[in-house]
Image (cartoon, helix red, strand yellow):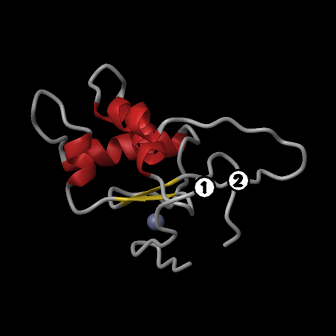
Amino acid sequence: MKPGINFGGRSHWVAVSALDCQAKAKSERYPMWLRVHYAALGWTNRVGHAGFSEGKLAEILGYAGHPNGKQHTNKAIRKAIELDLIHRDSGARCLVLPSHQAQQSGHGSADCKVHGIRA
Ligand SMILES: [Zn+2]
């Protein structure tokens, strides 16, 4: 994969802070579907995949000091997909950002065990 960010043509882009997105993903101030989107942005790798160990996303989306339930986590993922915030291949083990929406440059992995991607 060629390093760098390229949305094609003359399209311009903005950058977001991964740390800020991670904090917002954990914040109870936002609806769950938005927190899912922030989690995807906050933990994305160079190929747009944000991988999580078993139960980690539920922990990130927790509330009142408890991990989010599996059903609630999956419901929030479905809503984020429905709103076109993340790709339909997303699940609790990997949130996928469409490449037309977000790209990551620099450090980090370019692999995804969940989706079988090896760069
Ligand atoms: Zn993946």
Name above or below for residue 55 compared with residue 115: above
Measuring from the top left, give residue 81's x and y in whole percent: 51, 46
Residue at the extreme front of the image, as rendered: 106
Mark 1 element type:
loop
Residue at the extreme right of the image, as rendered: 9
Rendering quarter of residue 3: bottom right
Q: CA distance from mark 2 to mark 1?
A: 6 Å
Name above or below for residue 80 compared with residue 65: below
- Residue at image x 66%, y 45%? 101
Name above or below for residue 48 compared with residue 71: below
> Alpha-carbon neighbours of circle 2 within 10 Å: few (<14), some, or many (≥20)?
some
Query: Mark 1 highlights which residue?
Result: 105
**Which numbered tag is attached to residue 5?**
2
Rendering quarter of residue 35: top left
User: Can you say which quadrant of the picture contains the N terminus?
Assistant: bottom right
Rendering quarter of residue 119: bottom right
Work out whether residue 43 can be spotted. yes
Measuring from the top left, give residue 83's x and y in whole percent: 55, 37
Mark 2 element type:
loop
